[in-house]
Image (cartoon, grey):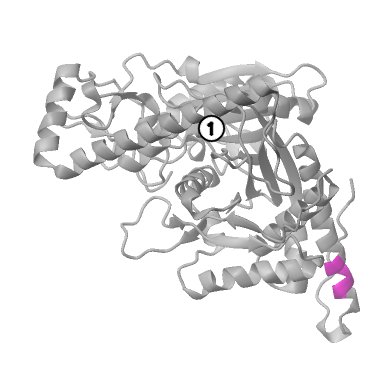
Amino acid sequence: MGPVARGSPGVADRLEDDVVDRVRPRDLTFLAEETPETPLHNATIEIFDPGEGEGAFDHARLIELIRDRIAFVPRYRQRLQSVPGHLANPVWVDDENFDIGFHVRRSALPRPGTSAQLLELVSRIVSRPLDRSRPLWEIYFVEGLEGGRVALLSKTHQALVDGVHTVDLGQLLLDLQPESRELEPDDWAPRRSPNPATLLSGAVRENLTDPGVLLDSVRTGSRALAREADRRSERVRSFVAAATGRRPKRQRGVINGPLSQQRRVVTVETKLADYRTVRQAHGGTVNDVILATVTGALRAWLMTRSESMGGLRQVRAVVPVSVIDEELEATSLGSQIAAHFVDLPIGEASPVVRLHQVSYSFQAHKDTGRSVAANRLAGIAGFAPTTFHAIGSRVAATELRRGYQLSVTNVPGPQAPLYAAGARMLASFPVPPLTAGHPLAIGVTSYDGGVFYGITADRDWIPDAELLGACVREALDELLDLSTASRERAPRGRRGPRAKPKPRD
């Protein structure tokens, strides 16, 4: 990662002798609001061609690669430590018993190693919260995929990655060339954790000298009490429902509802060239075409369910977007992420009209002059989509009060192959977390000529998530067919280069 130097003081949030690295209020919110039904970690599925022979990419080489790069993200070797009496926010401390073998795990699929088997494994892993007594991340090396491929499944807590002080570890593991970069030796040694008496005296001192610290502590305690009251009320309602045999009623045609502790993950792989063909025929941007595809998929999915759409004409979506903010200090990402709200017109029958309506909703953002071009984002050092998805999910979580129904995070990545320890990455699927009352979330990453969808759904509330994935393909095919027909009907002098027809499954 170009802008960051190993061991630079601006990156390493280490404990000094008399200074603690206290958890920031926003990061603490993600920790405090996590429940067994809403584990707040981001995940990514990456598929690799491991190569052959002694140099093949395996679990041992992955551990070696992570050992080589983890010094760039010191937070990945730190754990949480609470303050006695909760007089102040917890602090980050070096994990004196850091065990990379605990965090980098090995798994395998039974034969034949299909995509469905991989997604079933992923669904079970992402359903489990991270262990808070250790650094808040895990990576699984999954062997046995069809065609000799391997997969990496990474989980990182939302409190860990903010894009300013810490980027996602996945951004640092990939190189532009098969040959790994030569880096300086890592001489990390954990600093001794402060004892409870030190933390207590420091909290008292900060509360007396800095009113903001005391205010943060009071707010955190109040939110915790309110959440505990809500959880107790929910347990009472569940007990009454079980005693009376009544199940919660599913509101017809609405994609919001209560969450269970289980997830279902669906992935869809498409071609970037198809979105460019639609854009050339009807205008807008690739991002507009992706959102129009999501809109068409939601419409078809809702219409094919046993329920009707119940008069639902729009789905309110939060779409985190990249913006330029000259007043903020530049970070390694070079941009900030802000929430943009768009009403996806699922009640509109025409795919082209849906595309134009989505494009119009983003025009105001483009007119501000603060929007960031996709090619600029794709050129950021390392595989930045993993970090952008993490920030996007943080933005979506903080905007719950705005009453949206769905979060859609679309991040453009580099259009050239990337490598991990010499193994070429073939695909990258985001797995966004679910927030309370929102049993569906969609992430999209473009990379090396492909557009990769990751759909996270609650396993109980949305048992037909695979059908939504199939509807994504159909919605794109519908737009592509109309775009090809439009180009063929255009006058000869205005006709652009004809796109190759998209192969059907």
What residue is rendered at 43% in x and 57% in y? 335
Relative to 170, is 93 above or below?
above
What residue is rendered at 51% in x and 75% in y? 367
Query: What amino acid type should be assigned to the residue bearing mark 1?
Result: Thr
What residue is rendered at 52% in x and 60% in y? 340
Residue 394 percent coordinates (x, y): 46, 45
Q: Quadrant of the C terminus?
A: top right
Residue 223 percent coordinates (x, y): 36, 37
In the rendered image, residue 72 lying in the magenta stretch gets the answer no
Number of other residues with Cα within 10 Å of mark 1, as a class: few under 14, some 14 to 19, many 20 or more: many
Residue 365 percent coordinates (x, y): 52, 69
Of all residues, the one furthest to the front in this rendering is 244
What residue is rendered at 76% in x and 25% in y? 117
Quadrant of residue 425 within the rendered picture: top right
Quadrant of residue 23 within the rendered picture: top left
Taking the image as shown, residue 161 lies to the left or right of residue 377, namely left
In the rendered image, residue 486 lying in the magenta stretch gets the answer yes
- Count the marks: 1
For numbered disc 1, what is the local secondary structure?
loop
Residue at the spot of label 1: 38
Q: Quadrant of the N terminus?
A: top left
Main SS class of the magenta portion in the image: helix
Q: The magenta stretch spans which residues?
A: 482-487
Pick whichever, 261 or 452, lies toward us. Answer: 261
Taking the image as shown, residue 224 lies to the left or right of residue 320, namely left
Taking the image as shown, residue 23 lies to the left or right of residue 290, namely left
Taking the image as shown, residue 22 lies to the left or right of residue 496, namely left
Residue 179 percent coordinates (x, y): 55, 36
Residue 50 visible (yes or no): no
